[in-house]
Amino acid sequence: MNDMATGQPVEFSVLDLAAVREGKSIADTFANSLATAQYTEQLGYKRYWLAEHHNMESIASAATSVLIGYIANGTQTIRVGSGGIMLPNHSPLVIAEQFGTLDALYPGRIDLGLGRAPGTDQVTAAALRRDRFAANDFPDQVNELLGYFSADNKKASVRAIPGEGANVPVWILGSSTDSAYLAAAMGLPYAFASHFAPAYLMDALSIYRKQFKPSAFLQQPYSMAAVNVIAADTTAQASYAATSFLQLAVGFVRGFPKPLPQPVASMDDLWTPAEAAAVQQMRHYSFTGDKETVKQQLTGFLKATQVNELMIVTNTYDPDVKKRSFEIVAEIKEEINLG
């Protein structure tokens, strides 16, 4: 199966939430992320992205740019980037300087995905942003950032050094249709967070493709969608491993996400029917099972969405279970692209 837009094989990438495991340290989390990045690089995944979140015991990627540098330094070929940097939390100039620095250190390997949401609760957002209306200026902030990256900015009174002329592809990320309009109007690649916000995926992709305007960055629309995947040698093994993520998701539904717990035999006593329904809605694009089951699910998703690239999100307690899942998905990728 080739992607319809380019005729090229569908790329598979990885989104790492740097989930802190119950009983493990932040340092353990970072070491596990690096080991996962190194392994997925060997398996042929294209990108390894990290997401900005704050004030959460369960996620350790708050200093996203720093962590990207750590992962890039420990790998050789895989692209490393943000999925994403929540731009209203930052000065566009500072982000241009940070990613310009990363590009100078790891040339041709850095991606910059930009989001509008705070990546946290409203109280923490106020501590981060100071200006509570910062998100309203997101399009202007993106334009400002692109200006700092431009080689033509050398005559401006404010310059990003490093950053000016850097080769850092900028992506627009989204979980609603708003971002699709922006990505299309600016002619930028578009990534949708369907791993936790599935409701608007199809509408957003349709808007992006129909309204896309070619730009200096991109001549044709290029879309990516994130999906939760846990693949194992048997469906029973995968379902058992997935209960760690289900417990984590319950914490998000309750507003108190805790570190990623060990898997359990049954979720029955760990959530209410309403919580179970909320988690299942959030996990609409979650594919769990043995190789053949997950292959059928991913093939169906690619046919339905026609995205150019898949971003795989895998949260398991046992790192070896995660490694095996990425192995199986890499095999599926090869079979899909040969089919």
Image (cartoon, rainbow, N blue to C red):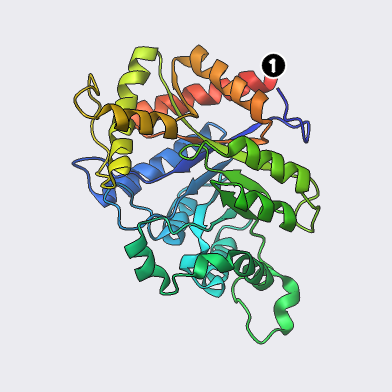
Residue 200: percent from left, percent from top: 57, 39
Type of the residue with mark 1? Gly
Front residue of 194/35: it is 194
Local packing at callout 1 (Cα closer than 10 Å; few below 14, some 14-19, many 20+) is few
Q: Is residue 93 left or right of residue 123?
A: right
* Quarter of the view holding residue 132: bottom left
Image quarter (top left, top right, bottom left or bottom right) of the C terminus:
top right
Residue 279 or residue 109, whichever sits in front: 279
Say which of 22 and 141 sits in front.
141
Expressed as whole percent of the image width and height from the top left, the position of residue 156 reads: 70, 84
Residue lying at 27% horizontally and 43% vertically, measured from the top left: 254
Q: Is residue 32 above or below residue 317?
A: below
Above or below — where is 302 with respect to 127? above
The residue under label 1 is 339
Side of 143 where 265 appears, left or right: left
Q: Position of residue 81 (x, y in %)?
A: 53, 52
Residue in the image at 67% along x and 49% along y: 189
Residue 60 lies, with reference to residue 145, above or below; the image says: above
Report the side of 215 relative to 188 (left or right).
Answer: right
Query: How many marks on residues?
Result: 1
